[in-house]
């Protein structure tokens, strides 16, 4: 992982993808992302997945296939979250709690590589929609990761932005560090090579 300040334009950086180390050149530094070039393609990526030299060569993590791949499974995971984080949800207002109890959730049919999911409080006509969509990029990924995505979206019922308070509560997720790490790696993998190659890392 590279700190933004320790990176210069034209630096060569490395990142893990497809189980091996790939090389890229830094073209531009934005506040939260770096624009990198890999072969002839350009990508905006988070600094946290970049390494400066190839001494660090832990392979892309392989993971167990999960079987939470239906919309019903997402409801089941929300139920688990409600039990496990009841202290947090007790701080929701009555209105927020009633949104939580009636929230709809489904896998987004589109593969997205920028977000893990999205919470829609209202629709275009400003009517209540109260629905969570989870990116299908994360089908077959570990249970703790799917739960983390749901946990994140449920927090948006209370906090619409990624405020300091939002981040504070997000980090209370039990497997926050590993989930956040795998989340970023999968987003990059899907962005660079598509969803199919991701399936290679699943332990059968
Ligand atoms: Zn969010």
Image (cartoon, grey):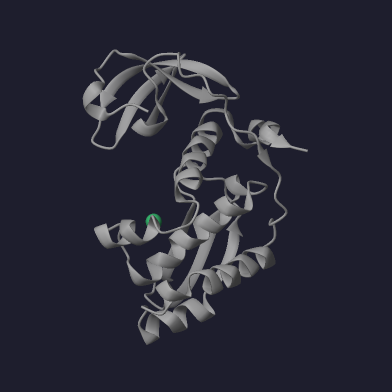
Q: Where does residue 70 sit, x and y in percent of width and height?
A: 70, 60
Give the percent coordinates (x, y) of residue 53: 40, 14
For the question of whether residue 93 can be seen, the reply is yes
Residue depicted at 53% across the width and 73% down the height: 82
| Residue 179 location (% of width, % of height) | 50, 47
Pick the residue in front: 49 or 123: 49
Which quadrant: the C terminus? top right
Q: Residue at x 51, y 65 (%)?
A: 132
The residue sitting at the bottom extreme is 94
Q: Is residue 26 above or below residue 141?
A: above
Q: Where residue 126 sits in the image (x, y, percent)?
A: 37, 75
Q: Tell me if residue 181 comes above or below residue 86 in the rendering.
A: above
**In this image, 20 relative to 42: left or right?**
right
Work out whether 127 lies above or below 171.
Answer: below
Above-or-below relation of 28 to 82: above
- Ligand 1 shows up in the quarter that is bottom left
* In the image, farthest residue toward the right: 204
**Residue located at (60% from left, 25% from top):** 18
Q: Nearer the viewer, residue 56 or 79?
A: 56
Location of the N terminus by quadrant is top left
Which picture quadrant has residue 4? top left
| Residue 46 in view | no
Q: Indicate left or right for 56 with 30 as reference.
A: right
Q: 142 or 116: which is nearer to us?
A: 142
């Amino acid at each position: 992982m590279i700190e933004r300040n320790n990176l210069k334009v034209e630096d060569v950086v490395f990142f893990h993808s497809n189980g091996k180390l790939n090389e890229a050149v830094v073209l531009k530094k934005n506040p939260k992302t770096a624009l990198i070039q890999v072969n002839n393609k350009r990508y905006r990526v988070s600094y946290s997945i970049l390494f400066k030299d190839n001494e660090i060569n832990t392979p892309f993590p392989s993971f167990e296939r999960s079987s939470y791949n239906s919309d019903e499974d997402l409801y089941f995971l929300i139920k688990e979250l409600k039990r496990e984080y009841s202290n947090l949800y007790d701080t929701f207002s009555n209105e927020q709690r009633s949104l939580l109890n009636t929230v709809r959730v489904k896998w987004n049919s589109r593969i997205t590589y920028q977000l893990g999911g999205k919470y829609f409080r209202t629709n275009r006509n400003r009517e209540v929609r109260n629905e969570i969509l989870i990116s299908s990029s994360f089908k077959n990924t570990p249970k703790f990761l799917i739960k983390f995505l749901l946990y994140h979206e449920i927090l948006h019922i209370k906090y619409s932005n990624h405020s300091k308070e939002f981040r504070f509560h997000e980090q209370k997720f039990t497997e926050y560090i590993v989930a956040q790490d795998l989340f970023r790696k999968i987003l990059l993998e899907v962005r660079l090579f598509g969803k199919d190659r991701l399936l290679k890392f699943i332990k059968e």
